[in-house]
Image (tube, rainbow, N blue to C red):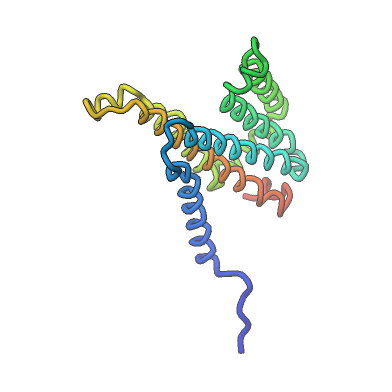
Amino acid sequence: MPKLSPNPPSWLRTILIALAMGLGAVLILFPAWLPDKKSVPLEDSVVELLQSALLAFSAALMFATAPHAGPFRAVYRSFGFVTIAALIAEIGGAIDDVINPLRHEYLVIPLLVWTGLTLLRRRRETLHFIGFASRHPASGFVLAALILNYAFSRLFGSTVFWRASLGAEYNSDIPPICRGYLELLACYFILLATIGYCLPLIRRRYKMFTEP
């Protein structure tokens, strides 16, 4: 009697991964199912919390992967700091309350400057990583996240758009809700991209960067 393979065939594994990603995209929208309580902005706070958690986990993965990246550890660490900068920008209001009269931009700008200088000093490794990323499917999630955050969330989070679309039926709650959920989906895509960049490298070390 032939033995069954412990691992599913590649086509089935691909389908399962795609289904898991789709299920995750649905599950992160669970704040929309919360009961509507006008006295407590529960939905908004949960969305913000989920965005922060996804960004924090993405940064943690980058930092955890850096020691396994060989000569590319500075590149992974730099992208970890970029994700931290995005997290700080996401919770900027809370940080502003803590460091008042300073603003969270005073933390974001040094992180971005340090990251830029680090990548500039490591030009060869950075270009090599870009070449690797351009061939990796995870880059599609990065592109989708950028489009969601800087295009769709701006459009569908615009008061002008919804006033023109709904006319007299316009509700002022619609723009921030749409913007919040699109940004949440973008954070989820960033996490998927981070996993895509990190897991293969942890398993196979930095030899993956030298593969054609």
| Residue found at the very far bottom of the displayed protein | 1
Q: Is residue 193 left or right of residue 114?
A: left
* 4 vs 185: above or below: below
Q: Quadrant of residue 175?
A: top left
Q: Position of residue 14 (x, y in %)?
A: 51, 60
Q: Quadrant of the N terminus?
A: bottom right
* 199 vs 38: above or below: below
Residue drawn at point x = 48 percent, y = 32 percent: 40
Q: Position of residue 26 (x, y in %)?
A: 45, 49
Q: Position of residue 115 (x, y in %)?
A: 68, 25
| Residue found at the very far left of the displayed protein | 168
Q: Is residue 207 left or right of residue 160?
A: right
How many marks on residues? 0
* 172 vs 200: above or below: above
* 146 vs 64: above or below: above
Residue drawn at point x = 49 percent, y = 56 percent: 18
Q: Position of residue 8 (x, y in %)?
A: 57, 69
| Residue found at the very far front of the displayed protein | 39
Residue nearest the observer in this picture, 14 or 185: 185
Residue drawn at point x = 31 percent, y = 22 percent: 160
Residue nearest the observer in this picture, 127 or 35: 35
Residue nearest the observer in this picture, 85 or 104: 104
Residue drawn at point x = 72 percent, y = 43 percent: 65
